[in-house]
Image (tube, helix red, strand yellow):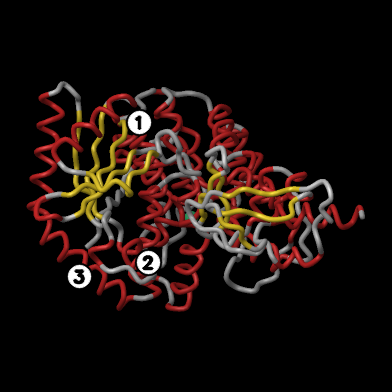
Amino acid sequence: MNNYVTISTIDELINAISKYNNNVEDLMLIRKAYELAENLHSTQYRQSGEPYIIHPLNVAYILSEMHAARDTIIAGLLHDTLEDTNITKKELEELFGYDVANLVDGVTKISKMHFQTKEEMNIANTRKIINGFINDVRIIIVKLADRLHNMRTLQYKKVNKQQENALETLEIFAPMAYFIGAYKVKGELEDLSLKYLKPDEYKMVEEIRNKAVERHSDALNEMTQNISDLLTKNYVYNEVFMRVKNIYGIYKRLSEGAKIPDIHDLLALKIMVDEVMACYMALGYVHSIYHPTNDLFKDYICNPKINKYQSLHSTIIGPDGRLVQAQIRTFDMNLYDTYGLSAYWYINNGDTRKNMQEEFKKDYALYDSLKEMNSIYFKDNDAFVRQVKGELFNDKIFVYTINGDMIDLPNGSTPIDFAYKLHTELGNTMVSAIVNDLKVPLNAKLENGDRVKIITSNLADGPQVEWLNMINTTHAKKKIKEYLRKK
Ligand code: MN
């Protein structure tokens, strides 16, 4: 069962784009890019036997679903031409401008990064690629669409290639989709990966999920209707849907030891309204008919996630005592929560890509991480890739300062990581740490929601060599080494 659309003509693509961008010049240029790509790939075929152009066409279609702007779509159509045909970057630039040529070049270079195989890869090249992302995040967006279409058509590849691509997708590309907030792409990449890596588990979880939907959908439909009616009666414009958690998400919770009834967001209610204040009003109305469980409320509108995800989450008690997560957000937030940064141009009414890049810099933790990674010395490429996987793509935890500021750290971080993340001087003068009112050792592993206080002293000895084994972030490592070197 595939729940995605595949297209086979340029008219279908133009039709999809014109639903959110009907600028005639943009559409003409996109058509021109298609004609060039079709020409250049005309003698090539995919392993499925289809003409090659079907691949870039569907990559561009995925980008259109993500509400991407013109140049991103054009880069999607042309993304394999530098690698597989004899057009040059300069020619692309003359025809479609610097941005498109640079995007295609960036996407071509990522394809040459090997995260799985031990193939020789030059660290200087890796840095160049990361620098590419730092300067234009759209490279990641086009690459994600490329990978998604390749994963959807993975059945035509050899088994060892399937395993390699699925693992790389799960370890590198699904997290990247998460980091730019493209949850829909992330979910599909994860599910496709699991299907190839652990087909039996995939089937088992899919059955569990189908059963849950069957068992609960009447009650959830009733809740959907009740909430929507109540909001409408009170003049809050709304749309309410039931949303089902992706298979990998459920699989992950189960493998962490959760039981099915513990997964309160297996089925959730998505409640969308016009503006921010209406979210809080809607929350009040929802709680007036379905009692909330107090300890499971999260306000990601005031405290967005590190990928700018915004929503109110409240676990409410539905009919027969079942727990259901209500997710309340504006329509614009929902676009961000679904497609991530790629919807920026659309949400901001055609705002420029320069501003989009600024937003990436300002609001997304991925930018800082990439920048940090690129500023550090690694002895070889293997060490670099290991660090990318470990730091950048592992789950994050969220902890609080005593002032209530939220700080994100990679899972497994300690009070030393926390101190250096806040301020170098704090790390250099720390003597002990208090977590949730209890004194803990410096190498204690922090957990989600911990309140952390760092105790400092003017008489502190400063960081010790042993501290290097008590930390989990590159940043702390760098700062401790700097200190030790000076001493
Ligand atoms: Mn491709």
Q: Position of residue 8 (x, y in %)?
A: 31, 49
* Residue shown at 29% from the left, 30% from the top: 279
Q: Would you say the residues marked 3 and 1 are in contact, meaning their CB atoms lie under 8 Å apart? A: no
- Compare residues 188 and 101 and report the one nearer the observer: 188
Q: Locate residue 336, reporting x and y percent.
A: 39, 37
Mark 1 / mark 2, whichever is N-terminal: 2
Residue 291 in the figure: left or right of residue 428: left
Residue 7, image x, y percentages: 30, 48
Decide if ligand 1 comes within 8 Å of the CB at mark 2: no
Q: Amino acid at mark 2?
A: Lys
Disc on the earlier residue, 3 or 2: 3
Residue under label 2: 252
Q: Determine contact: label 1, label 2, CB under 8 Å.
A: no
Residue assigned mark 1: 332
Give the SS element for disc 3.
Answer: helix
Q: Amino acid at mark 3?
A: Glu
Please give the name of the residue rendered at 42% of the width and 78% of the height, measured from the top-left corner. 159
Q: Is residue 49 visible?
A: no
Q: Quadrant of the C terminus?
A: bottom right
Helix or strand or loop: what does disc 2 sit on?
Answer: helix
Amino acid type, mark 1? Asp
Question: Which residue sits furthest right?
Answer: 487
Check the picture and name the quadrant holding the N terminus: bottom left
The CB of the residue at mark 1 lies under 8 Å from ligand 1? no
Q: Which residue is mark 3?
A: 207
At x 19% / y 32%, what residue is drawn? 285
